[in-house]
Image (spheres, coloured by chain):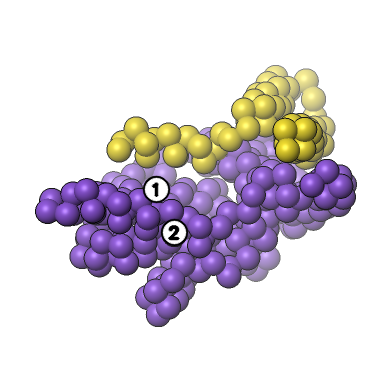
Amino acid sequence: MIGAVVKQLFGLFVDDELLAAIILSVVALVSALALSGVVPGWLVGLLLTLALPAALVASVLRSARRGTRSG
Amino acid sequence: MPNLTTIISVAGASFAASFVEAVEALTIVLAVGLARGWRPALTGAGAALAALAVIVVSLGPLLGAVPLHALQFVVGVLLLLFGLRWLRKAILRAVGVIALHDEDAAFARETRGLTEAQQRRSREFDWIAGVTAFKAVLVEGIEVVFIVIAVGAARGLLVFASAGALAACVAVAAVGAAIHRPLARVPENALKFAVGVMLSAFGLFWTGESLGVGWPGGDAAILAFIALFLAVALALVALLKPRAAALA
């Protein structure tokens, strides 16, 4: 039962692996840029604001293409 | 001191998200109660609530020991994963690519499974029923606890987030106790759509803030992010719905 609970909890955050991977990659990249100080704060914010909705769009379009193809 | 907009956003997001989780837990507990009796259903649900209380009481004080920026970063990233996942699924459900979540179907499936198991093991103590209710309430309850922490902890608004979640759980439990049927008429996908938008907006805001971004307008930027994710999600629905309908 513990395994099932842990699996369900993991599933809370990861459903589409591509979406999770893009989100984590974006956050890792932007964090590295922010912590190294090579980009100003406003650019860090802009990158997050553009990249995260774009990740959603990519994931939804991919799933819709697969779903309609298989359906 | 956070402004009224932030407080309402936090309590509202916590209420809506917890409402969805509570409806899912109620469906399973009702199925257990009606198929196998109320004793194992309520015992299982009660044990899960006790386990949740132990988790909250033992881990809650640790939150205060975590530096605020680290907490905002971790919570922000988890909210992005959680919120964008919900939003993605809600969009795909809205356009018909994946089936809508059906509480009636979930209720019937759970009831059928438990009734068949009872027929096979009619003389045994009802551990299956109790464990089923326990697991459902524990898993959905952990989700509620996560939501409360995620939307409330990074701004010191745990009280408002907890109040939102508690109100949702009480409302669902009261309606469930009154009608003894799953709450199938709740517009679950619309709720998940709205919650996905709000949690994604909170995730973006707190991840940025933890990285030193000074958002224009301060907390009001959350409203701008809500508008952004809502616009993107609605645009995707508008784009994909005609295509999915044409292929259906």
Residue B151: where, in percent of width, then height? Answer: 55, 52
Examine the rendered structure and indicate whether residue B229 appears above or below residue B167. above
N-term-proximal mark, 1 vs 2: 2
Query: Disc 1 marks which amino acid?
Result: Val
Instruction: Name which residue lies at 77% across and 33% down.
Output: A69
**Marks 2 and 1: in contact by CB < 8 Å?**
no
| Residue B153 in view, yes or no | no
Q: Which residue is mark 2?
A: B108
Query: In the picture provided, is A37 more to the left or to the right than B176?
Result: right
The numbered dot on residue A63 is none
The image quadrant that residue B53 belongs to is bottom left
- Left or right of A44: which side holds B46? left
Q: Position of residue B108 (x, y in %)?
A: 44, 59
Q: Residue at x 76, y 50 (%)?
A: B95
Image x and y of residue B218, in percent: 73, 53
Q: Chain of mark 2?
A: B
> Which chain, by letter, is purple?
B
Circle 2: residue type = Ala
Q: Is residue A5 visible?
A: yes
Neighbour class for label 1 at 10 Å: few (<14), some, many (≥20)?
A: many
Determine whether the residue tagged by mark 1 lies in a helix, strand or loop.
helix
Q: In this orientation, which residue lies closer to the viewer: B233 or B63?
A: B233
Q: Is residue B223 left or right of residue B181?
A: right
Q: Which chain is yellow?
A: A
| Frontmost residue, B211 versus B163 | B163
Name the residue: 47% across, 55% down.
B106
* Residue at image point 32% right, 67% down: B34
Q: Which mark is residue B139?
A: 1
